[in-house]
Amino acid sequence: MEPAAGPLSGVTVVALEQAVSAPICTRTLGDLGARVIKVENPEGGDFTRSFDDVVNGLAAHFVWVNRGKESVTLDLKTPAGTAVLHRLLDSADVLVSNLTPGSTARLGLSPGDLAVSHPDLIAVEIDGYGPGGPLSHKRAYDLLVQAESGACATTGSPGAPAKPGPPMADVSTGLYAALSIVALLYGRERHGGSGPASVAVSLFDTMTELMGYSLNYTRHTGVDQQPRGMGSPAVAPYGAYATADGQTVVLGTTNDREWQRLARELLDRPDLADDKRFARNADRVEHRDLLDTEIAAWCARHDLTHIQDGADSAGIGNSRFNTPSDVIAHPHLVARDRWREIDTPNGPVPALLPPPVISGYAPPMGAVPALGQHTDTVLAGLGIDADEIASLRAAGVL
């Protein structure tokens, strides 16, 4: 039986992308069945290709967000290179880019330009800060935007701010971009429309959206909440505690009923449950240090398994603090068959399935491309013959 076609089967996406934000957007579209043509500079390509060589000689970042794409090399600083790009866009549905500020306009790919040259194209531009502001001209990387948006100030511990480990600004912006593309494609399918459409998504706007709770709290209280390490400034008890067997358990409550169950059923401490200082969440947040001392002392007397079994029985959220090494062999991933093997230029490597589980559809999990691996076949598909391809390559365009 042939595998079911993806929801975006038949959609062609051209990507002028680097790093993570645009590549995670286009990889997401590819996971849903779209064809993704990644246009790279002939001299090195996407700069994340050379970040490291830990994945069989390939870079961990690049392997993560570039599977299933076709790599075409074009020197877009040459008229011939931009001419080939526009031929690609003639048959594309979507253009995704995250180049430095002003680059798309210099290439004749501004929304106004595309409305004339490619009237049915959906053009999505990811940038750092969005147009029209004092920071619009600046380069923007994940750490820089997380710092600018206040995210680093809410992470870490008091006096020791930190960047969240995963690239939250890049990934979240890429997913907002992918969502916008799917919405526009759906709108065209549903309502029969066409014509140009442009979307702009900035890392800064995305991160200030993710900071919604913190910004609301500070706007209405005048208080900058201090980061709580493995805890939360909004809820208590909610944190990590060392266990008797050298592990770390994470326990969380989100409402007063859960607190009552944690105190009475898990800790066997009705005195804490009845203590007026801990009656409501706001009270517990105020007296967080007292609660953490009591819970830490109890956890230190018990093994991780005992704590988690008891928490599960009491209906209390809990988890084990894991390192990346732990997660690679995580029994939950193994039991649910979440790992697949994908091809790369240097041999097969394991990769996780994408998060959406769509009934009847298996994500393609295509190969990670070598730089320029698909240049000749893609250009041939545009009607460019072998002699012209050879001439373009001799001129350094490819």
Image (cartoon, rainbow, N blue to C red):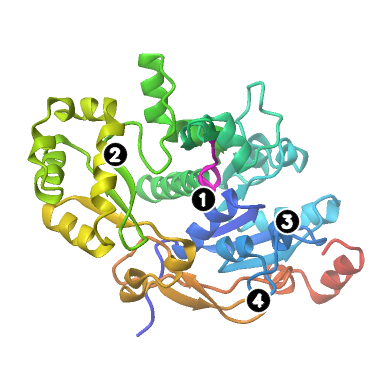
Q: Is residue 68 above or below residue 61?
A: below
Can residue 127 be spotted in the picture?
Answer: no
Q: Is residue 181 above or below residue 273?
A: below
Label 3–label 1 contact, CB within 8 A: no
Of 30 and 268, which appears nearest the observer? 268
Residue 2 x %, y %: 38, 82
C-alpha gap between disc 3 and disc 4: 18 Å
10 Å crowding of disc 2: few (<14), some (14-19), many (20+): some
Please identify the quadrant where the N terminus is shown: bottom left
The mark nearer the N terminus, 2 or 3, is 3
Residue type highlighted by circle 1 = Pro
Q: Which residue is mark 1?
A: 166
The mark nearer the N terminus, 1 or 2, is 1
Q: Which residue is mark 3?
A: 47
Of 120 and 378, which appears nearest the observer? 378
Residue type highlighted by circle 3 = Phe
Horizontal side of 165 relative to 43 (left or right) equals left
Q: Which residue is mark 2?
A: 292
Disc marking residue 211: none
Residue 368 x %, y %: 61, 71
10 Å crowding of disc 1: few (<14), some (14-19), many (20+): few
Residue 36 x %, y %: 58, 62
C-alpha gap between disc 4 and disc 1: 22 Å
C-alpha gap between disc 4 and disc 2: 45 Å
Residue placed at 29% from the left, 53% from the top?
Answer: 300
Which region of the structure is painted magenta? 161-170
Residue type highlighted by circle 2 = Asp
Q: Residue furthest right?
A: 395
Which is more foreground, mark 2 or mark 3? 2
